[in-house]
Image: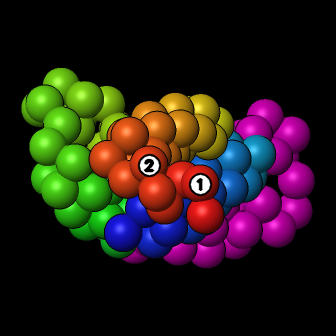
């Protein structure tokens, strides 16, 4: 459950950074091909963000996060680079919780 969330957080984060760069190239630098790139990456990010939402919601539900934290994690896929930082924080938090819950597993 945590692994699939982490994978989708990175995929969503990378695509959002690429989309941001594509928008800068398209509107700021007026580069040829940037419009097509932005379209393709935007569609990919949009669909994969939906998968990210499902996985993040599932993780948050099982981790029993409060609504505010759940929204914070869900919205991380909409701010360039935020998904990377939020993923790290969530992973550290949940790994610490798992280690507390199962000290024998942490030693192995």
For the record, the magenta segment spans: 23-49
Q: Closer to the camera, 71 or 36?
A: 71
| Label 1 sits on residue | 107
Residue 27 placement (x, y as % from top left): 72, 41
The secondary structure making up most of the magenta span is helix
Q: Going 46% across and 57% down the picture, which residue do you hit?
A: 104
Residue 5 in the figure: left or right of residue 66 = right
Residue visible at 75% across and 39% down?
24
Location of mark 2 (residue)? 103
Residue 31 pos. (x, y %): 88, 53
From the top left corner, tell me how far across and down residue 86 is, in percent.
Answer: 50, 35
Q: At 86% from the left edge and 40% from the top edge, which residue is drawn?
A: 29
Q: Quadrant of residue 1?
A: bottom left
Membership of 30 in magenta stretch: yes
Within 10 Å of disc 1 (Cα), the crowding (few <14, some 14-19, many 20+) is few
Q: Quadrant of residue 2?
A: bottom left
Could you tell me how far apart the alpha carbons at marks 1 and 2 are, in whole angstroms? 6 Å
Q: Residue at x 82, y 68 (%)?
A: 33
Q: Is residue 48 left or right of residue 34?
A: left
């Amino acid at each position: 459950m945590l692994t699939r969330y982490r994978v989708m957080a990175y995929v969503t984060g990378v695509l959002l950074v690429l989309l941001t760069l594509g928008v800068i190239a398209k509107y700021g630098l007026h580069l040829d091909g940037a419009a097509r790139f932005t379209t393709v990456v935007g569609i990919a990010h949009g669909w994969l963000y939906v998968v990210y939402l499902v996985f993040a919601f599932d993780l948050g539900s099982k981790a029993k996060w409060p609504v505010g934290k759940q929204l914070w994690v869900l919205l991380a896929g909409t701010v360039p680079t935020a998904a990377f930082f939020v993923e790290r924080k969530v992973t550290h938090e949940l790994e610490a919780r798992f280690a507390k819950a199962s000290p024998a597993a942490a030693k192995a």
